[in-house]
Image: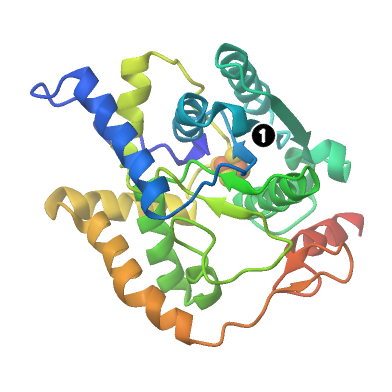
Amino acid sequence: MTCRRNPKLTVKLDPSISKEEFYRTIKGKFLRAIKNNKLIRQSDKILVACSGGKDSMLVLYLMSQHYHAQTTALHVDQGICGVSSPSLKIVKKYCALWDIPLKIVSFKQEFGKTLDQMVKKTDHSPCYVCGVVRRYLINKTAREEGFTKLATGHNLDDEAQSILMNVVMGDLRRQARLGYSTGIVTHKGFVQRIKPLRDVYEKETMINEQLKEWNLFTCNCKYAIDSFRGRMRDLLDDYEAKHPQTKKNIINFYDSKIIPKLAQKQIKPVKNCANCGEPSSQEPCKTCQIINKLKK
Ligand code: SF4
């Protein structure tokens, strides 16, 4: 999501590197992540979740260059005043430019309420509601429309933040879901998620946006203030400034040491929500819990 942008990050292309070299580096990381982790097969139908921000638009661009015939974009309109329509405009513009089909779904259409309306009736944080409902809708749309891969714009910074957030929360189940692809927690109702930008730093996606002059929408979401992820991001950025490679080291540690241990553990299997039928580790699923509260 565009809401993850870190205004503190200074972004400037190293003068010793040419634009072409920089683009080659990004493309190389994207293609290597796909090849080394077998993320895409020729028969796959790929849905790219696009918020209109620098990360998801970079995935869409690279997919349009390398997997054009297999790619479709998906935009979820959460219904946030001042955010939703400019984001949609961006996604529409670039889908037309890169000749990629676009699907649009919305909170309002699916649940009868926008996020702005939902947050007035629940005591959960807006970002929690936004994240839970958006993930639900993206997975459901991908599965119902027959897509076999769901690509997201998660970058290296996002992944390092998620690993540490799960440590702080002591959440083993969420920890097991990370990686280049859907983690070790699987269910036939989940479309396989892929993260082809997992080796690309957020700084690089920002520089890419500037160099390409895409003029994407900068999210000013009123709910972005003081989120858990935001605090973790600031902490990691400060640490990385003093100890370069910290983020990469966290990811390497996760891939080489944590995941093999988690794979040996019995993680509770995912079931189907008795209410909506979607895969869930809770009963009812988190989305139904939110929607039920809205009805009271
Ligand atoms: S509600 Fe939170 S997660 Fe959703 S767009 Fe706003 S800042 Fe991002």
Q: In the image, what residue type sits under mark 1?
A: Leu
Dot 1 beta carbon under 8 Å from ligand 1? no
- Which residue of the protein is positioned furthest toward the left in this rendering? 16
In the image, 175 versus 237, the foreground residue is 175
The x and y percentages for residue 166 are 45, 69
Q: Position of residue 116 (x, y in %)?
A: 74, 39
Q: Residue furthest front?
A: 42
Q: Quadrant of the C terminus?
A: bottom right
In the image, residue 258 above or below residue 19: below
Q: Quadrant of ligand 1?
A: top right
- Residue 37: horizontal and vertical position, in percent? 41, 55
User: In the image, what residue occupies the spot 45% across and 15% down?
Assistant: 215
8 or 268: nearer the eye?
268
Whether residue 48 is situated above or below residue 199 in the rendered picture: above
Q: Which residue is mark 1?
A: 74
- Graded by Cα atoms within 10 Å as few (under 14), some (14 to 19) or many (20 or more), the crowding at tag 1 reads many
Can residue 223 be seen in this snapshot? no
Q: Is residue 267 left or right of residue 208?
A: right
Q: From what the image shows, is residue 181 above or below residue 195?
A: below
Colour logic: rainbow
Can residue 266 be seen in the rendering of this structure? yes
Reply above or below: 66 against 178.
above
Q: Secondary structure at mark 1?
A: strand
- Residue 287's quadrant in the figure? bottom right
Residue 283 located left or right of residue 35: right
- How far across and down, in percent of the image, does residue 137 sit? 74, 47
The residue positioned 84% from the left and 61% from the top of the image is 293
Residue at x 53% of width, y 39% of height: 1
Looking at the image, which residue is at 40% across and 74% down? 259
